[in-house]
Image (cartoon, rainbow, N blue to C red):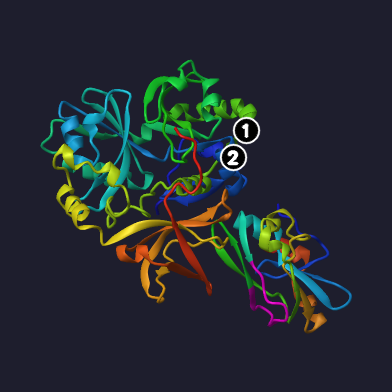
Amino acid sequence: MSNIPADLRYAKSHEWLKVAADGTALVGITDYAQNSLGDITFAQLPKVGATLKAGETFGVVESVKAASDVYSPVAGTVLEVNKALDANPEKINQAPYTDAWIMKLKLANPADAAGLLSAEDYGKLTG
Amino acid sequence: MSLPQVTPLNAFHRTHGGRMVDFAGWDMPVQYKSILEEHKAVRTRCGLFDVSHMGEADVKGPEALKFLQHLVTNDCSKLFPGRVLYTVMCYPHGGVVDDLLVYMRGEGDYLLCINAGNIAKDIAWMQEQARGFNCTVVDRSPGYAQLAIQGPTAAVLVQTLTKTDLAGIKYYHFADGEVAGVKCIISRTGYTGEDGVELYCAAADGVRLAEAVVAAGGPFGLELTGLGARDSLRLEAGFPLYGHEITDKITPITAGLGWVVKFDKGPFIGSDVLKAEKEKGSAKKIVFFKTGDRRIVRAETPVLNAAGAVVGSVVSGTLSPVLNEAIGSALVEAPAAKEALAVDIRGTKLNLHLVKPPFVALKKN
């Protein structure tokens, strides 16, 4: 059973979104996704300042098995990226919801987060 | 519908948390916990691999040696009972049918170990070539389980389970013995570049042997290791894998395996073509590279010269868990191998630094 924190929102493509009160959000990949990929060997991070549409590719997470595109769950602007993943991409395996957030977004429209899956619905998708 | 084949250890893998994938038509564990951790365990301690999917064949008869000398490129007359030889067998055009181990059990009595994905093809090929020789080729694959215990502590671990003196069996030698009460061929061979053993036993004894190795393995840091680590370990050691560095279109000379091609033993299948290639020089060659970057350079990635022209193609690629950078091999036009080479990975140009394998220092066997 994979870990699906109740306080996050989820995309069908296995990214999570953690919205803060100030209209920013952290984005990463789910425990289910990291477990499916296996050992993560490389994370290609987006550029700070990049403007992303909902569903747009913002990076690549690569494992021994395959390189997978990751998609922005919502529209927004990249405020910050998690540089620690350059040297230690395996953090995505170890702490996918905390240490291994990939980017911090300024949401184009904070209401968009409500359109994503709840933990319960994401659990049904991956169950 | 064609279901994947299973080894005698299939339930063992599932019980021990193996992540099962299809490999060459076999349902095999690619990993148990982590490919990278399993790889490191074999470099520093030891790992247990189920390699029961590998094929075995008996070659027996008064002309078994004469047949093998015709069939394979290496010189089987150098064998004696208890000795193992690595070789390839080729088509008349020089491409490789398979790479294999030849075990000499006695006069006119040999055991071959062949690749899982090639069993049917190899057996048919060998039986056809054996016509006219007074010997038989018989597929024994279903009868055997095969376990590989590899790593610096592998031999000391297995020594606790057997009366056979493992230190007395040199690299590429074997002996019949009992391990954990199971009759085995104890072979000092492997596909990781580390010290260790490969144990061939009756299929029905495979699980009992594996459980005994696991039960004894704790003090030696044993990990269960899957095909993912097996592939990265072999690539780090610079060993070829059929379908990658050697294929029916890549000759052993092209692949850098000239050391297993012995022209002085007399003619064999493909010898004329291989000799001509050796004398004239190969049009293409297999090279090994690292990049200094973590992006994996996967098979079929085009290899580019300084002008950006395609001069070859990657055949194997992974992340070296020891070096923490991408390593791989590529088939490139021979003149290009002397120039600067690069690949483009998702828009990032990475230079290939050619190296002579192994990529990591390996303990001398």
Label drawn at residue B178: none
Taking the magenta stretch, the answer to whether it contains residue B270 is no
Q: Residue at x 20, y 32 (%)?
A: B136
Q: Residues within 10 Å of mark 2 (few under 14, many from 20)?
A: many
Q: Position of residue A103 (x, y in %)?
A: 73, 71
Taking the magenta stretch, the answer to whether it contains residue A45 is yes
Q: Is residue B247 visible?
A: yes
Where disc 1 sits, the SS reads loop
Confirm or deny contact between disc 1 and disc 2 (CB under 8 A).
yes
Range of magenta residues: A44-58
Marks 1 and 2, Cα distance to the nearest angstrom? Answer: 8 Å
Numbered disc 1: what chain?
B
Relative to residue B233, is residue B149 depicted above or below? above
Magenta span: predominant SS is loop
For disc 1, the marked residue is B221
Identify residue type, mark 1: Gly
For disc 2, the marked residue is B41
Q: Position of residue B197 (x, y in %)?
A: 46, 30
